[in-house]
Each structure stands twice: as structure tokens, then as C-alpha cells.
Amino acid sequence: MGDVAKDLTSGTVGGAAQLIVGHPFDTIKVKLQSQPAPLPGQPPKFSGAMDAVKQTVAAEGPRGLYKGMGAPLATVAAFNAVLFTVRGQMEALLRSEPGAPLTVNQQVIAGAGAGVAVSFLACPTELIKCRLQAQSALVADAGSATVAVKYGGPMDVARQVLRSEGGARGLFKGLVPTLAREVPGNAAMFGVYEALKQYMAGGTDTSKLGRGSLIVAGGLAGASFWGSVYPTDVVKSVIQVDDYKNPKYKGSIHAFRSILASEGVKGLYKGFGPAMARSIPANAACFLAYEVTRSSLG
């Protein structure tokens, strides 16, 4: 089996593990990010992460925590194929000789390159996911006691966007903040992952590390992703769920300034707790599954 096929297979397994572990946390993150600012003197729809969990389960059942999972699950193979294959090809280009270990700085470059590539898959996938996750939170200011369902599922979101939001271009709404998240985020994640592996291995040969070390390195690497780019993710989410006919934001910079003006720095970190709580176990699962699968393929 060639390296590209190995990266494809291993990346798919890793992505599936990451999605299953992390999606409920991601649902709560998006709900907190996209809830409308409350009127003066009024409390927000969700007072925090646990309140969002309770309200979601009460209104939609446990399945509500997995809302929007169809889109990323359907594209996890393609997404992780690009992420890990581009990273693998970048590694091959950066190596001084075949089989030579990469430095941490080289892994940062490889991660950034992979981030550019995956942005073009991540943007439409995340737009669909965010629309499904946020649709119940977006009616908070309408005083509705029930969950308003605008979209019937991932394909329905895609159909509605293609039909009424400018065709294929509508699916790439939020591409700029997606790039601004994926490029530095993946650079940080793969750089930290390699740095931690080399630290725990006591050198550049990390092939003998146990699963516990891989779990620690993967979890902390995932945390570094969100720690470095979280405000960008907030901007991406609000842009992607913004109304097409009556937009609240003119673009990414306007969204950033509006959030900062109305909610302060705190507004740029809405949902940060669930994101960090998700990133550690989800990315630990992803990297462990990737490494174990890659190793088993030879």
C-alpha cells in the first residue's frame, strides 16, 4: 500500500474517532457562539455550557447533541484524506533525505500547508453543520418555546443554500475566516504534537512511544489549535449562520469589530470552554487512531 493510501486510510479512521468523541462538545460550542445578544436587562438564552446541554437535551433529546453530524461524517474521509495526505507530501518535500525525521519547525510548515488545502473542504461542511446546530438557538429572540426547524438535514441545508444564496458560492461563505483558522491552527497543532513527542521520546526518534504518550501529545496538540485561533472560529460561525437576505455583518472584519464592540473580548471566546473540553479527548482519539492505524499498515 502506497503512502498516500496509508495516509488516506489512517486519516479516515482518526477523523471518525475524533468526530464521535467530540461532536456533542462542538454542538454546544456553536450554540453558545451563535446565540443572539440578549436585550438590555434580559438574560441570554444559555447561561453557560451546562445550561446549553440541559436545554438541548430537554428540547431535542440526546440526539440533539449530535445534530449536524451527518455533514462532517459524510466528508470525514475526504477531509482527513486531504489533511494527512497533504501533510505527508509536505513532509516528503521538507525531508533532507528519505526517512529522515522532521524538525518541529518543519512540522509547523507542513501543518500550515495542510491547513490551506483542508479549508476548501472545511468551509462548506462547517457551514452546513453550523446551520443545523444553531437553528434552535437563533430563534431565542423570537420568544419561541419550541425548536424551530428550518432545515431537515445536511442535504436540505445544501439545497436551500444553492437555491437561494448565490449557488455554489453560498456554500463557501466564511472561507476567509476558515483559512485564518485552519492555517495557523494546523501549524500550531502539528508543531506542538511533534514537539511533545520528541520531548517524551528524548530525541527525534518517536517510533517507540507508547499509546499513553500519543494520547497526551494528541490531546495537548488539539488544545493548542483552539487556543491559538478561537476568536477566528467565533467570527467564522457567526458569518456562516448570518441571514443571507438581511445580513447582520458585512464581512469578517465587521463581524469581529461588532462582537468586540457589543460584547467585549469575552464575546470572542463564547463557547471556549466546550471547545477546549472537546479538543483534548477528541484530538487524543484522532491522533491515537491515526498512529495505530498507520503503524499497522506498515
Image (cartoon, rainbow, N blue to C red):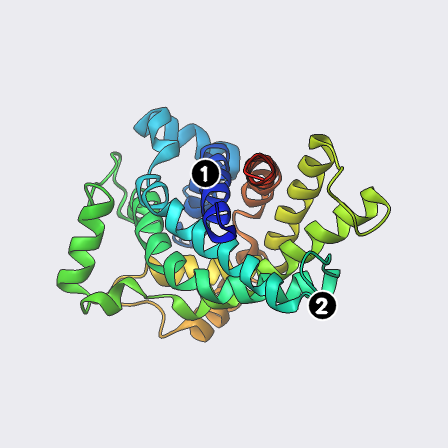
Q: Amino acid at mark 2?
A: Ser
The image quadrant of residue 269 is bottom right
Q: Nearer the viewer, residue 48 or 86?
A: 86
> Residue 249: image x %, image y %?
36, 70
At x 65%, y 68%, the residue is 94
Q: First in sequence, mark 1 or 2: give its number.
A: 1
- How many numbered tags mark residues here? 2
> Residue 144: image x %, image y %?
25, 40
> Residue 131: image x %, image y %?
30, 50
**In the rendered image, is residue 217 in sight?**
yes
The residue wearing badge 1 is 19
At x 86%, y 46%, the residue is 202
Compared to residue 183, the image places residue 34 above or below, namely above
Q: Nearer the viewer, residue 53 or 174?
A: 174
Q: Secondary structure at mark 2?
A: loop
Q: Nearer the viewer, mark 1 or mark 2?
A: 2
Q: Amino acid at mark 1?
A: Leu
The image quadrant of residue 281 is top right
Q: Secondary structure at mark 1?
A: helix
Compared to residue 227, the image places residue 150 above or below, namely above
Side of 220 where 49 appears, left or right: left
At x 31%, y 45%, the residue is 71
The residue wearing badge 2 is 96
Disc 1 versus disc 2: distance between alpha carbons?
A: 35 Å
At x 34%, y 53%, the residue is 125
The quarter of the picture where the C terminus appears is top right
> Residue 245: image x %, image y %?
20, 67
Q: Nearer the viewer, residue 214 or 26?
A: 214
Mark 2 burial class by Cα count in 10 Å: few <14, some 14-19, many 20+: few
**In the rendered image, is residue 265 in sight?**
no
Side of 37 where 270 appears, left or right: right
Mark 1 burial class by Cα count in 10 Å: few <14, some 14-19, many 20+: many
